[in-house]
Amino acid sequence: LAKTTQPISMDSYEGQEVNITCSHNNIATNDYITWYQQFPSQGPRFIIQGYKTKVTNEVASLFIPADRKSSTLSLPRVSLSDTAVYYCLVGENGRDDKIIFGKGTRLHILP
Amino acid sequence: DADVTQTPRNRITKTGKRIMLECSQTKGHDRMYWYRQDPGLGLRLIYYSFDVKDINKGEISDGYSVSRQAQAKFSLSLESAIPNQTALYFCATSARLVTSGSPNEQFFGPGTRLTVL
């Protein structure tokens, strides 16, 4: 199973761009990189998924270098409501039984 | 996600009692999961099911059992609850993978906060 490492916590200010980096040195060829967001007392919510290069949607961007040993979730112009825990997961699509939710990164947005 | 519901939302019980947590989904997904989350920690997989009557153990299945009698429902039972099973429990669903290139996401319910005294 591909293990991921991400910062325990981060602080930022409203209006800033926030980048959260995740390391996954032993990512396998068939593995995708997925990020989830979790607000207090709620279930996690899918944000974005990618395999290589860059993926962008209405919420975030995901940057994946050529070696795929790390990835960066980028949140543009954050607001207070982006305060949450962000999980980086690595695993093969369709094998949800094999993915691991680590402790995630606790992002705190300050006014 | 309103498409995945869990009952009850909160439950306080005593050591030794049998408890059942229910999960229902209207997303039409084949796959369902039960996780537990302890304060400050990530989610750990308890059991999962890829189809009706298909049951598979996850990372921490001891002390738990599940039932999948219908596609839309997946129930989790604690046969004899103990205090260290106090946690937040989440049910999730996902669709069977259609193509390898499509995003494979799980949809989570609102959670059940269980306290075992």
Image (cartoon, grey):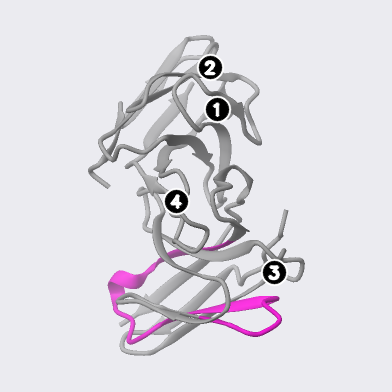
Label 4: chain letter: B
Front position among marks 4 and 1? 4
Answer few, some or many: residues within 10 Å of disc 1's Cα (few below 14, many 20 plus, some between 14 and 19).
Answer: some
Q: In this view, does A1 lie to the left or right of A105?
A: right
Foreground residue among A25 and B115 = A25
Residue numbers of the magenta segment: A63-89
Residue placed furthest toward the right: A26
Q: Residue B38 location, x and y as percent?
A: 54, 42
Label 2 SS: loop
Pointer 4 and pointer 3 on the same chain = no
Front position among marks 4 and 2? 4
Pointer 4 and pointer 1 on the same chain = yes
| Residue at the disc numbered 4 | B98
| Residue at the disc numbered 1 | B85
Label 3: chain letter: A
Amino acid type indicated by mark 4: Val
Residue placed furthest toward the front: B99
Pointer 3 and pointer 2 on the same chain = no
| Residue at the disc numbered 2 | B81
Front position among marks 3 and 2? 3
In what quadrant of the picture does the C terminus of chain A appear? bottom left
Calculate the distance from the C-alpha at mark 3 to the C-alpha at mark 2.
37 Å
Amino acid type indicated by mark 1: Gln
> Is residue A46 one of those drawn in magenta?
no
The residue that appears at 47% across and 10% down in the rendered structure is B18
Front position among marks 4 and 3? 4
| Residue at the disc numbered 3 | A24
